[in-house]
Image (cartoon, rainbow, N blue to C red):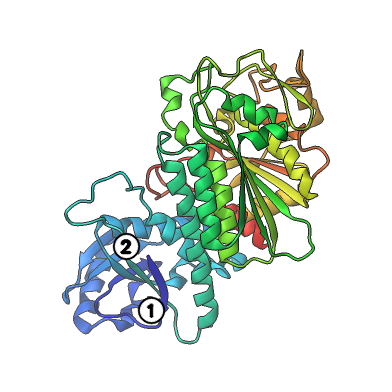
Amino acid sequence: MLIKQTGKIPQNVDVVFAIRQDVEKHPFFGMLSAKEKEYVRNIEKNLKEGERVVPLPGGRKMLFAKVPEKFNHRKSMLLMRKIVAIAKANRLKSIVINIDDFRTGEKEFDAVIPRVAAMEFEMANFEFVKYKTQPKGGWNFVREILIYADKGRIVADIEKQLKEGTIIGEETNGTRELSNTPGGDMTPTVLAQAAIAAGRRSGFKVKVLQESEIKRLKMGGVLGVARGSSEKPKFIIMEYLKGGKGKPIVLIGKGVTFDSGGLNLKPSSGIYEMHMDMSGGAAVIHTIAAAARLKLKKNIVGLVPSVENMPSGSSYRPGDLLKTMSGKTIEVLNTDAEGRVILSDALHYAKRYDPELVVDIATLTGAAMVALGQRASAIFATDEKTQEQIIESGELSGDYVWPFPLWEEYEDDIKGTFGDVANDAKTRYGGAITAAAFLWQFAKGVSWVHIDMAPRMTSIDGDYLSKGATGSPVPLLLQFLRQ
């Protein structure tokens, strides 16, 4: 989709009015013909609430949307998506929008509205249609959005922000494309190929460790989970090192391309979307791709351990003891708690980079969804200042996170009987926390953040995003990295 700035309303473009009070005070009103003005006045009188698309006398259409009361940055971002969703539903191909319609009076947010708007427009315009037959009339995507700003504004800054937001939106959608791909077509090999392709396009180095190299490194967690599948494991390493001599930030993404639960097989109700269990890995790939395209002066490393968790005669079993790269042993109590097992090796591998910070991203626990619903990801951190920065980044990007405790007392819940740690807790309660406590055992000695993105794996009603993966937490991570 093309998103660009304009200082006028072209005659062949449909017009969006986000109305706060009197429609005649809107900057677009004065640019209409006399006949169009009278028509708009009558429509506005009858527009009590909600949205409406109406044809104007000249042939073009107008989308009216009421700005909600107590307007804030959260409502502003939803309005951005909602307008595109309505435009798509009404097959509006080219629209013009006033950027000031989304201002809230919140200084920090208003300063980056063009960037946020471009990102939200791209995300709202996305649908996963790769496996669908194109209808006769074509897809109903919006082809062009013109962003109006009066001539007194700093044009270069708005244009720069629009380009940045478009890149973030495109890479978020790239994450969604990977995550939505069915498990039969998304294997560890395919995920590794996607990382290599992203590196070539965007400009970062990619190395993929094969099973023999994974064995040499003694990554018993990755190898143990992968045993039940005919698909060989991969360990994907991505390096974008443009920050001079500074220590890198290491991003780790869970890359389970299909999670059947293994021998602890998932029930029918829980297995359908498990091709998305590599969403954390997809997010890391496209976060680094976006950072490279944005030319961020940062050192960023991405690690994605990728496996398929399947039941077979060679599967790892409850009761097995796996020796990880760190030397610690994992007592397997549940083969469906596989994400933390493969992440244990990645967390230890990350220490090779002497990182400033390690952030892992994983669709890890249903318990996080029980605690938070589906509107925010869970966050755990060893550093309070970093945690606050990530929470603030979530607020600014619309990709929300909420903090959970990481106390030493929780370590007692994941102690093994025959091994060092158990991959399932002694208690049925606090599953998101005990999973984080497990990962913490392999992250000791570095500043570390864990994002359990299971709550935000898929979109929900009210997101104004198409069904399927959300692309979270790519917007959050990029906002954080920029800071």
**Residue in the image at 70% along x and 54% along y:** 389
Secondary structure of the residue carrying tag 1 is loop
**Sequence-earlier tag: 1 or 2:** 1
Looking at the rendered structure, the kind of residue marked 1 is Pro
- The residue drawn where x is 73% and y is 44% is 350
Cα distance between the residues tagged 1 and 2: 23 Å
Q: Position of residue 125 (x, y in %)?
A: 37, 57
- Residue sitting farthest toward the right: 445
Q: Residues within 10 Å of mark 1 (few under 14, many from 20)?
A: some
Mark 2 Cα within 10 Å, few/some/many (few <14, many 20+)? many
Question: Image quadrant of residue 65?
Answer: bottom left
Residue highlighted by disc 2: 142
The residue to which callout 1 is attached is 27
The answer to whether residue 76 of the structure is visible from this angle is no
Question: Tag 2's secondary structure?
Answer: loop
Q: Looking at the picture, does residue 162 appear above or below residue 483?
A: below
Q: Residue furthest bottom?
A: 152
Q: Name the amino acid, label 2.
A: Val
Given this view, does label 1 or label 2 mark the residue nearer the observer?
2
Is residue 115 depicted above or below 417 in this figure?
below
For this orientation, the residue located farthest to the front is: 212
Specify whether residue 359 is in view: yes
Q: Residue at x 27, y 65 (%)?
A: 93
Comparing 289 with 363, the one in front is 289
Query: Dividing the picture into quarters, in which one does residue 39 lie?
Result: bottom left
Image quarter where the N terminus lies is: bottom left
